[in-house]
Amino acid sequence: MRNNIGEPVDRFNWARPPQAHVGVPTREQLAFNGYWWEDPARLMLFFIMPLYTLISIDLLGDQKAIAQLYFNSFYAFAGALFLVVVTAVSYLGRTVAPPVTQAPVEISRWVLDVLFVLSLIGYLTMMSGVITHPTLMLSFFNGDANTYDLMAVKGRIAGISTLTQVAVAYVPLYFYVFQQPALGISRYKIYLLVLLGLALLRSFVFAERLALIELVIPLTVMYLKFRRSHRPSRIIALGPYAAIVPLVAFFIANEYNRSWESYYVKIYSNIFTFALDRLALYYSTALNNGAGVLKILGWGVGDPVFTLDWWFRFPVLGDFFQAGRDFTADYVAFLSNNADPEFNNPSGIFVHFYEWGWFALFVAAFIGWVFNRSYSGWRAGNGFWCCAHSVFLVSLCEILRIPILFSGRNFVSIAVLFIVFRFCRTKSARSSRAVV
């Protein structure tokens, strides 16, 4: 295939300069237009919504694992409608063939150095209490201390500890800057491994599994985009279904010191049954908590607790806007009085009905538009949207459990990517570069 000036081009490399596509998609383009789960609409249709249906049927059936059940057929319908709107809007304007590839933006390698330093500062701040109490860490791995003991010494400085989320921007940006693999070790590869190691440690020490998920999903998605073979992999094509087994294995390893040895070993016959039950409960209780918020706290109360979470957590300005009010106090009280504080996820669906009532469907439409725009930019090879799309997919995969899209942690990583592509680019086009 040749472009409009007669030069040969690789039609599968969407990260190169503009190229001409034939009017009718070729068989090769149709056969491998990316994996289905890279498309938010198909991810919703073939994974998220079936999972929501299964959990809803379980909650509406003979549910015995949850003491206080709030989820009913009305809330099941409202949640399904929310997801349908997200799916429909994210699909609008879709074309079969990839759009014309945009000229890539050149990002200097020094940007990665800066992002790593910022991430490291955030992690050192967060881990400061653990670092100054090494015996506590040893006790944790020996089984004498638990996660809650370590969380008590967790370092928190507004605007500084949040810099850990810069690591979420580093991962996709690394693959964008170095699109061609090369042998050998570079400091940027070491940075990547260090950040993954710190996120893994964070998931064990502070029970923040999401911190590792936020790195693994962008890493996987970006790796496949820039390093993928022209021939699709059948295992990778399974997408989130193939991830279930490693997710359960990670959950077992993560919960072993946290709750298995200290308590649940006396209740369950084996750790695998425990892991499956516990993992399922995280999602079912999240939907039930969301329904409980609507039933106990109200429908459409007008408090933008979750939609403006990113603003409330903004250093200085967020404190001024809140004027000393704790917008999460009502939800914490709900958990203490009407639910289980251990299973404290509110879902990423019903919280918007709590804030806006039926106007939450406009929030769903906005979410769909964000994914529509990010996926379009992803297919076109737009630098910012390529990186942002890999980050946004995390919030879509976790929409049944937690509202990440509007969270302060998500805002940091997206804002960093925006600043990098807006102010740190050096030129409009380049040839692909390799790690040295």
Image: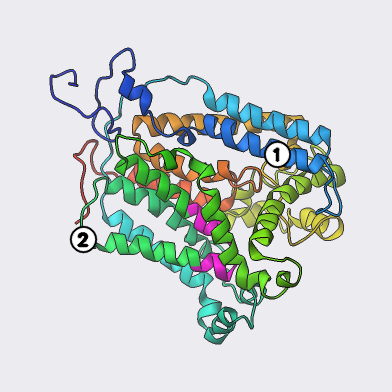
| Mark number displayed over residue 54 | 1
Main SS category, magenta section: helix
- Comparing 430 with 39, the one in front is 39
Residue 349 sits in quarter: top right
| Mark number displayed over residue 127 | none
The C terminus is located in which quarter? bottom left
Residue 32's place in the image compared with 296, above or below, is above
Amino acid type at mark 2: Gly
Viewed as shown, does residue 124 lie left or right of 85?
left
Residue 95 sits in quarter: top left
The residue at which mark 2 appears reads as: 184
Viewed as shown, does residue 222 lie left or right of 243?
left
Q: Residue at x 53, y 67 (%)?
A: 202
Residue 208's place in the image compared with 346, above or below, is below
Q: Secondary structure at mark 1?
A: helix
User: Around disc 2, counting alpha carbons within 10 Å, would you say few (fewer than 14), some (14 to 19), or many (20 or more)?
Assistant: few
Q: Which residues are magenta?
A: 201-214
User: Around disc 1, counting alpha carbons within 10 Å, would you say few (fewer than 14), some (14 to 19), or many (20 or more)?
Assistant: few
Residue 249's place in the image compared with 311, above or below, is below
Answer whether residue 207 is magenta in the image: yes
Q: Nearer the viewer, mark 2 or mark 1?
A: 1
Amino acid type at mark 1: Leu
Viewed as shown, does residue 237 lie left or right of 290?
left
- Comparing 317 with 277, the one in front is 277
Total number of numbered labels? 2
For residue 270, say whether it is visible: yes
Answer whether residue 102 is magenta in the image: no
- Comparing 341 with 234, the one in front is 234
Query: How was this image coloured?
Result: rainbow
Q: Secondary structure at mark 2?
A: loop
Viewed as shown, does residue 174 lie left or right of 293?
left
